Image (spheres, rainbow, N blue to C red):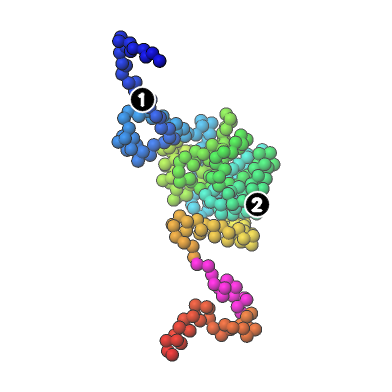
Amino acid sequence: MRRTSPNPTHQPQPHAPQAANPTLTLRLPGALQRLQRLALRAPFVADLASREATVAKLVQQYVFLPANVRDVYLAHLLRENQQEEEPDTVIVFTASCRTCEVLACMLRALGIECEALHSQLPQARRLSALARFKQGSLRVLVATDVASRGLDIPQVQCVFNHNVPAAPRDYIHRCGRTARAGRGGRAVTLVSQYDVELLLAIETHVGGKIEPLEPEEAEVLEMLHDVASARRVALLELTQSGFLEKEKTRRSKKREALEGTEGPAPAEDWQAEPASIAQHSLEGGEGSKSGPPAAKQASAAKKKKRV
């Protein structure tokens, strides 16, 4: 094959700069910012983090109260809403699954129809509660933060925060369940003497003051005895159903997993089934006059040493 001679007039072109490899992230923590300054030259940073804020049509209020009567104030506010000609649709946000279930049982004992919604419920019960709430046949939904994201129910007119969220963004997500699609809404937060700093942090984050709401204290305290009785009924009901014991076990396992420790050793047969051991002793079986297996082994070892 004939080879063509190179063009003498052709001048080599300088190398074009390599295309930048963009790195996209929702937010840059301090460690990533330091790495960016050390390893990258003139990087292009796209900040895709959304600006969290409450809408202008949302009325934000707080009730300052003693911590030991928090449930009484909540029951009073819900009963006032129930007595309206057209009651508002309300979501009550709580801090934990246990508190959510106890509050729902307590409110039902007080005659306030409601349902609980949290992660420990069976899927069928969760879907049933949501369906009733969306249809309007259920006016009050007691929920954990599992309902603060992803639920689009435009007709929610009021949000009650039974506790003050530790993170301001959680407060904004809770309030975002109301005042949707251009509608108005109201968010009422129950603040105790221990929650003042959390409230101030929320006000700083949203860039405005939250207005105080002051119910008549005498009217609220009239429900004190009824609420105390209803709470005892709720605790008894949940104890009999086994929910409290299951929740205690679940939280214990979660705590052990977080601490990185192993769980307690499984109980021996003589601890787990004392009734069967007692019956075996009455029948004259082996071990009727001795203690647990560990004690029998220790006693045998001592006898061997003496011999």
Q: Position of residue 272 (x, y in %)?
A: 57, 71
Cβ–Cβ under 8 Å for marks 1 and 2: no
Labels in figure, total: 2
Disc sitting over residue 201 in the figure: none
Q: Amino acid at mark 2?
A: Arg
Q: Main secondary structure of the magenta part?
A: helix
Q: Amino acid at mark 1?
A: Gln
Q: In this rendering, would 150 be left or right of 109?
A: left
**Is residue 274 in view?**
yes
User: Who comes first in sequence, dot 1 or dot 2?
Assistant: 1
Question: For numbered disc 2, what is the local secondary structure?
Answer: helix
Find the residue positioned furthest to the top. Answer: 9
Q: Position of residue 104 (x, y in %)?
A: 61, 51
**Is residue 112 in view?**
no
76 and 170: which is toward the camera = 170
Neighbours of disc 1 within 10 Å: few (<14), some (14-19), many (20+)? few
In magenta segment, residue 209: no
Q: Residue at x 58, y 48 (%)?
A: 118
Q: Residue at x 68, y 42 (%)?
A: 132
Neighbours of disc 2 within 10 Å: few (<14), some (14-19), many (20+)? some
Find the residue positioned furthest to the bottom. Answer: 307
53 and 42: which is toward the camera = 42
Q: Position of residue 42 (x, y in %)?
A: 32, 28
**Disc 1 target residue:** 18
Disc sitting over residue 108 in the figure: 2
Q: What range of the chain is rendered magenta? A: 265-278
Question: For numbered disc 1, what is the local secondary structure?
Answer: loop
* Quadrant of the rendering where the C terminus is positioned: bottom left
Q: What is the distance, in whole Å, between disc 1 and disc 2 at their CAs? A: 67 Å
In magenta segment, residue 273: yes
Q: Position of residue 172 (x, y in %)?
A: 49, 38
